[in-house]
Image (cartoon, rainbow, N blue to C red):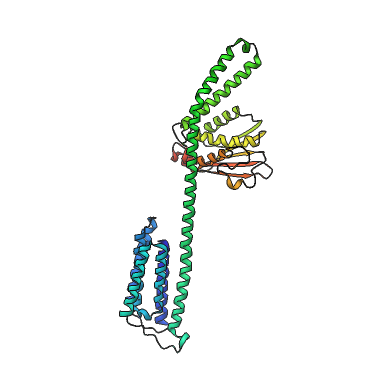
Amino acid sequence: MQQLIQLRWIAVVGQVTTIATATMFLGVDLPLPAMLRVLACLVAFNIFSHLRWHEQRTVDNRQLFLALLVDVFSLTAQLYLSGGMTNPFVFLYLLQVILAAVLLQPWSSWTIVAITGMCVAALALFAPPLALPADGGPGTLSLYMKGILISFLVNAALLVIFITRITRNVRTGDAALADLRQRAAEEEHIVRMGLLASGAAHELGTPLATLAVILGDWKRMPEFAKNPELLAEIAEMQTQIKRCKAIVSGILLSGGQARGESSAKTTMKVFLDQLVDEWRASRPIVSFEYDNRIERDIAVVSDSALKQMICNVLDNALEASPQWLRLEASRDRDSLNLVVTDAGPGFAPGMLDHVGKPYQSTKGRPGGGLGLFLVVNVARTLGGSVAARNREHGGALVRLSLPLSAIALDPEESSHAA
């Protein structure tokens, strides 16, 4: 519709220019009052269309059909007043027919063809011929032949310009639709993974409880009670089983939603500090740098999915760089930024273009690449983004950007605090 409005403004300018040139420089006698009234109606309709479609963003076939009918009838009125079939600009009907074929449904396009055909027939039967002055140019140099040439050039230029724009719009829409289909497929994949994870969590509950009971019994047995080294190992095994049970409970609580039943009220600094303390205590990291640069704290919502998203990035970095890792947290006006840096080998050259795609990994094991896939999709669900790149001096950098409005308890508070 916006393309038709622009084309209509071009038609208004073209008609004004043509009428002025024909009357002032070529000496053609035209009924100016009537033609200017038609032109004024076309301008009024275009202003109305601009005001309406500036706010309403959806257009159906019927509305496009009516808009093209207005263009056809205004062209017919102007041609009737300026010579009918003897006017070389009668070929502008082809522009309306081609636009109808591109924009409308088949029945509407054929209706436009029938209406333009009847308009041409009516002009041939009832319109008075155009009285052209003798310009002394016979054959190809006559004024009529020059008009046909100008009409052809105008038709060709407008068709190239607007068909190119309309085709570009169609390609953009197809690309957006393909992206939506890809996202739907990825989300369906996540749902399947969530169902499998929930089922596995239920199944793991019983053996973990059994192991906890057995270790408790071992700890009280005289053979183990007299051996401090074995007691220490049993205590470590109990700690790891508690961690496994906490992970299983988190899976069952989160239910695959970014802000679900496991949500909890906290502040941004407290959430990140607690997450880092828990992660550092349960991972064999040699050197871990944590730099929290958040100056203005706000109340936020945290849950297991958000926590797991950040831990996944840290776990991937730890696997690549077990000796050194860095997490930097900061915020700008309306987003939380987390930067994870490692000193590992970095991403493979072909991996950076596929970050966030499932099973895109160089680890060489089944299921590799699902960590960043989940990270990207959770961030996208929250309205954020994930960017990855290799550092100049070795290692990789992953940046998480999350809008404060997605995690803040009071979005207005987050905007005021900025």
x, y percent for residue 328? 59, 37
In the displayed orientation, state which residue is furthest to the left: 126
Q: Residue at x 53, y 23 (%)?
A: 208
Q: Residue at x 42, y 75 (%)?
A: 17
Q: Residue at x 49, y 50 (%)?
A: 179
Determine which quarter of the picture holds residue 235: top right
> Is residue 272 in view?
yes
Q: Residue at x 35, y 71 (%)?
A: 116
Q: Is residue 337 left or right of residue 162?
A: right
* Callout count: 0
x, y percent for residue 292? 58, 35
Picture layout, residue 381 above or below residue 323: below
x, y percent for residue 8? 40, 67
x, y percent for residue 394? 68, 42
Q: Is residue 394 left or right of residue 274?
A: right
Picture layout, residue 2 above or below residue 407: below
Picture layout, residue 217 above or below residue 239: above
Determine which quarter of the picture holds residue 409: top left
